[in-house]
Image (cartoon, coloured by chain):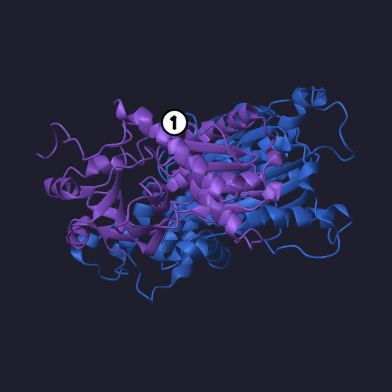
Chain colours: A purple, B blue
Amino acid sequence: MKAGGGETPAPKGKGLGGEKLNTEKLKAEKLDAAGLKAAGLKAAGLNILAVDTTSDFLSLAVMKGGVPGDAPYEALGRRMAREILPRIDALLKGAGLKAEELDLLLVARGPGSFTGTRIGMGVAQTFAQVLEIPLLGVDTLTLLAAQTDPGESRPFHVALNCARDEVYHARFRWKDGIAQMEGAIALRRLETLAPEIGDAPVMLRRFGKEDGRAPGNHTAARPAANSRDPDTERRFAALNEMSPVHPRPDGKRLLAVGAPRFLARREGPWPPVLPLYLKSEAFRTWKGRP
Amino acid sequence: MSATAKSTGNRTGNLPAGGPLGLAIDTTFDDTSVAILRGRREVLANLTLSQYADHAEFGGVVPERASRRHLEVIQRLIGDALAKAGEESHGGASGDDAGGDSGGASGGAAPVSLAALDYVAVSNLPGLMGSILVGMTVAKSLSYLLEVPLIGINHIEAHPYANVIAHGEPAFPLIHLVAAGGHTLLIHQRGHFDWEIVGRSVDDAAGECVDKVAKMFGHPMPGGPVVDRLAMTHQPGPYRFPRPMLNAPGLDFSFSGLKTAMLYLLRKEGLLEEVAGENRRPGNVRVKASTEQGPLLAAFFAAVCDVLVAKTLRAARQFGVETVTLSGGLAASAKLRERFGQACAEAGLRLLVPPPELCTDNAAMVGCLAAFRYEAGRLDDLSLEGYPNLPM
């Protein structure tokens, strides 16, 4: 691909858009239901609110009595802080749930947009504190991994493009219906990471690419705009990109990953949850300063 | 005062004894502060966590770091404030604990229950946007869950309310000098919610200028206290600094030239360490270790005080007010208070100054203004927005 313009080559197995989406969506919902039932959630009858603001998208999901309900997913950009509580209110009301009936809060803790992540975390922390219920955080790479086909037997990589040639990266493997991280999340340069990955399948997310342009602020979308370097584009294009069976890293993924984790250690303890930044707060360097 | 005198708004029909109970949050800059007030000015808790040490290595506040710290500490601070307020409202230790550092709270009394709150207030401007959003997100969540009104507060409008806490209800009209971190402002206030900015710093604020000059002398942020101490203990000596815009018409301030004047003087007197070529700029110079700092800084601060005093008194004359107030971090300066005290006495003006702990950023002043807003029924909703700047 040429630098700075032209058509983006159609990525292999793109999950968004087109006719394919509807069938995949149905399939995804079936998998959700099956996965959650297997985890005993239905029996547990839990009421859960899931909040993900790690990108330009506000992604929410509600579960009532162990049954997944609505999961709005909307590009809000800079309007996130303004809209989040009215949207949560509408979601709960739509589900016929009062906030005080919630049993659990799930939150995506990053890595992602710093400010965006803090908005969802501030809400989730406060809900958990006021309602005196547990708060469980899930990292965004695990949510991306959960978009892939549980039938995938090979180990695979998850890469979230944050800026230019940099990606947040981790390795995963599906085991017992759970996408399990092997090792830890690291901030890597694709230049050195790509040769390590080789032909292995990669679940890739580039803000502002798969999701389209969000209105307002492009905090999270900006990195994609930065990665016009032809070498970087070539590296991304050469990856063996996986086709997600769940089209979006949305609140449903957060429910599907977080709720079973909660059941597995229901008695707690529940340590405070904070954002996962993985980048120094002083990532800009000033002349004459360390 | 009309707004409060007839405050029989829809939400104030039956106030609990002592007035409404409010929780206020301020995260506009680098201090995380939570306060709980009963009525207009009874401060039950006012806890502030300062981040200065967290930013020392950078010589200034790193916005992203400030935002991260706010989120790390705010839930605990709210819990501590509720506990502290519980002690206070059960006849706790001291009746006059408007300030108070975050010391956590312990003891026998039950904490104030979140369910007892009548409103939640939060500073939604001006400041660092990422930091403001932390406080706002938490405040909105509290307002939603507790089903109580949300009140967005202009941090600058709130600063003078430190004087309401300290001295009681004011007799309008007033001229306020607000000398806070990034702003030096003269405000003409005719009544609650009825005010306008009549003078402002057009470049560096006074506090900013003091911080930058203190940095030249090797003192970390905040530079105010050390400059103030030296100004109190030294005579200005032979040094003479300009009084920027003192003779210009109008009420605006300019302090960046004063910083440059200090730089030129230090250079002329040969008091600067040699700094390599391209690093040679105001933010990057250091005085020689042998420099006698007292007279230089006393002379410099005298110029700052002269300008602030003269413009404030000019505003008082121009608007025909009988009372002026000081607030904001720089108002904690003993030298500035001394100069204002003399000048106001000579001019026959009443001067109101809050205790130092209410000068620097704190949520009690936010809660005090919010109590008036609550009584007047001037409330916000969950779609409240944050703004980094003051409206022009």
Quarter of the N terminus of chain A within the rendering: top left
- Tell me: A107 left or right of B372: left
In the rendered image, the vertical position of residue B98 relative to residue B310, given as above or below? below
Where residue B274 appears, as percent x and y from the top left, is 25, 70
* Nearer to the camera, B265 or B87: B87
Q: Quadrant of residue A166?
A: bottom left
User: Could you tell me which residue is drawn at 50 percent across and 46 percent down?
Assistant: A35
* Nearer to the camera, B224 or B105: B105
Q: Secondary structure at mark 1?
A: strand
Quarter of the C terminus of chain A within the rendering: bottom left
Where residue B260 appears, as percent x and y from the top left, is 34, 53
User: Could you tell me which residue is drawn at 64 percent across and 61 percent down?
Assistant: A268
* Nearer to the camera, B74 or B351: B74
- Tell me: A56 left or right of A16: right
- Check the image and name the residue furthest to the left: A2
- Determine if residue B30 is in view: no
In the rendered image, the vertical position of residue B48 relative to residue A57, given as above or below? below
Q: Quadrant of residue A68?
A: top right
* Nearer to the camera, A150 or B127: A150
Amino acid type of the residue tagged 1 in the rendering:
Glu
Where residue B41 appears, as percent x and y from the top left, is 78, 43
The residue where tag 1 is placed is A74
